[in-house]
Image (tube, grey):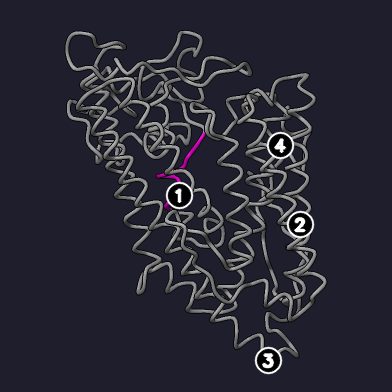
């Protein structure tokens, strides 16, 4: 991924002539940290519920217990996606995020895949390793004993094996694959269709190695819970993430703006949306096994707006809110604040149109199909909204007098011809 450096360098990061604003920055950062703490705590609560549903599936595989585990996974995505705006600008989150939300993945590393998936390649010789079917194998020339599938094996040996980012062995998407299986429908209707019998122990097991598949799913959910425990603690009172943001007010405000702009532009508008549309490739959709991509995109957009407005609605319906970045910008330049709020609302509305279309029968991978003019228009409108709000975020950066902000970019937006090279 390339980097787009916006030319926003000013002479000073101070809010010259606006002494009242400087005094308010600390309160804004407290709100920012409080929302992070609530979002990660909600993510942890829903991950624990997912872990319980997975345990029930393993104990008694059935259509009902598999459906319940899928429902729990979908619920867990709601709060987590709203925290993604914290990734960019906060090193503690960015260094950690790949453990829980890395994508796309070469799922053949983990379990059986359809023959259409292909073979190992020069890019990834472990793309069909199938750890579940193989209790011992070699990685990078070293023997690996995988007779017991544990969180440690997944985290320390398998995840990003051979330093290849396609070897995603942990996190939400590895669990998603183990619950849904491959989506073999391309840009046609239908998600993954893994049978519950893939978890039957003994007679009736499908897919082979049902005991090891259950062990992998159990270990992966345990690891997800552990990883979220770490991040929830990091943003709680006294936590490392909270302390880093509050330690330097100007750096904290920079982190907020960097997270908003980078997720809006390079990550969501570019890598997660425009790229897949350019390639008409369902493998580029974020939740590709479950066909939940529309919701992931929506909650990413909502998370950006949460940070700017200083308000987050928790999974129990309560609200965490306080002094906002919006108020700082409004004090510096009311017109910029009004523009950015309008743009954020318009983007969330455009992302909601994706949700409505998917709930109406046109899943996100179907929107990517060549010749689907309606789907292309829906995605293009959301991408346009994200790009436009990024331009308004640039103006907010200027209004606040912050220098040296860097937003992530994407070839799909900045150099489209490179996508096809």
> Foreground: 344 or 399?
344
Distance from the alpha carbon under mark 1 to that under mark 4:
22 Å
> Foreground: 67 or 11?
67
Q: As displayed, is residue 341 above or below residue 386?
A: below
Instruction: Identify the image quadrant of the C terminus.
Output: top right
Q: Is residue 22 left or right of residue 110?
A: right
| Residue at image point 43% right, 22% down | 127
Residue occupied by mark 4: 274
Distance from the alpha carbon under mark 3 to that under mark 2:
28 Å
In the image, which is nearer the foreground, mark 1 or mark 2?
A: 2
x and y, in percent, of residue 118 in the image: 49, 12
Q: As displayed, is residue 180 above or below residue 46?
A: above
x and y, in percent, of residue 184 in the image: 52, 15
| Mark 4 / mark 3, whichever is N-terminal | 3
Q: Is residue 191 left or right of residue 62?
A: right
x and y, in percent, of residue 410 in the image: 69, 43
Residue occupied by mark 3: 19
| Residue at image point 30% right, 27% down | 65
Q: Residues within 10 Å of mark 1 (few under 14, many from 20)?
A: some
| Mark 4 / mark 2, whichever is N-terminal | 4
| Mark 1 / mark 3, whichever is N-terminal | 3
Distance from the alpha carbon under mark 1 to that under mark 2:
27 Å
Residue occupied by mark 1: 97
In the image, which is nearer the foreground, mark 3 or mark 2?
A: 2
In the image, which is nearer the foreground, mark 4 or mark 2?
A: 2
x and y, in percent, of residue 114 in the image: 45, 11
Part of the protein shown in magenta? 96-103
Residue occupied by mark 2: 343
| Mark 1 / mark 2, whichever is N-terminal | 1
Asked if the residue at tag 4 contacts the one at tag 1, i.e. Cβ–Cβ closer than 8 Å, the answer is no
């Amino acid at each position: 991924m390339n980097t787009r450096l916006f030319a926003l360098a000013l002479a000073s990061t101070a809010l010259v002539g606006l002494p009242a604003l400087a005094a308010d920055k600390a309160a804004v950062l407290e709100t920012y940290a409080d929302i992070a703490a609530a979002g990660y705590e909600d993510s942890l609560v829903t991950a624990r519920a997912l872990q319980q549903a997975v345990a029930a599936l393993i104990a008694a595989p059935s259509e009902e217990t598999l459906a319940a585990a899928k429902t729990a996974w979908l619920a867990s995505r709601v709060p987590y996606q709203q925290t993604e705006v914290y990734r960019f600008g906060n090193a503690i989150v960015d260094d950690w995020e790949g453990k829980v939300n890395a994508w796309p993945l070469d799922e053949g590393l983990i379990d059986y895949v359809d023959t259409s998936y292909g073979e190992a390649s020069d890019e990834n010789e472990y793309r069909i390793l199938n750890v579940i079917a193989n209790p011992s194998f070699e990685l990078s020339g070293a023997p690996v004993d995988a007779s017991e599938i544990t969180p440690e094996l997944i985290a320390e040996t398998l995840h990003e094996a051979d330093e290849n980012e396609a070897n995603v062995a942990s996190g939400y998407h590895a669990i998603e694959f183990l619950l849904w299986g491959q989506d073999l429908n391309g840009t046609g209707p239908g998600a993954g269709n893994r049978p519950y019998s893939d978890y039957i122990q003994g007679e009736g097991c499908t897919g082979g190695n049902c005991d090891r598949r259950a062990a992998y799913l159990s270990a992966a959910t345990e690891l997800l819970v552990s990883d979220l425990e770490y991040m929830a603690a990091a943003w709680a009172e006294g936590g490392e993430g909270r302390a880093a943001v509050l330690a330097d007010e100007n750096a904290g405000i920079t982190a907020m703006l960097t997270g908003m702009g980078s997720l809006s532009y390079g990550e969501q508008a570019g890598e997660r949306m425009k790229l897949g549309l350019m390639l008409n490739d369902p493998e580029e959709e974020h939740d590709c096994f479950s066909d939940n991509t529309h919701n992931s995109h929506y909650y990413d957009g909502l998370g950006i707006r949460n940070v700017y407005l200083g308000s987050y609605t928790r999974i129990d319906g309560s609200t965490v809110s306080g002094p906002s970045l919006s108020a700082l910008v409004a004090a510096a330049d009311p017109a910029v604040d009004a523009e950015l709020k309008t743009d954020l609302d318009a983007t969330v509305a455009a992302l909601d149109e994706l949700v409505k279309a998917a709930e109406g029968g046109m899943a996100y991978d179907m929107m990517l199909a060549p010749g689907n003019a309606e789907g292309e228009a829906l995605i293009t409108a959301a991408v346009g909204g994200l790009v436009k709000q990024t331009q308004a975020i640039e103006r907010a950066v200027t209004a606040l007098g912050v220098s040296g902000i860097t937003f992530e970019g994407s070839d799909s937006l900045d150099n489209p011809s490179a996508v096809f090279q």
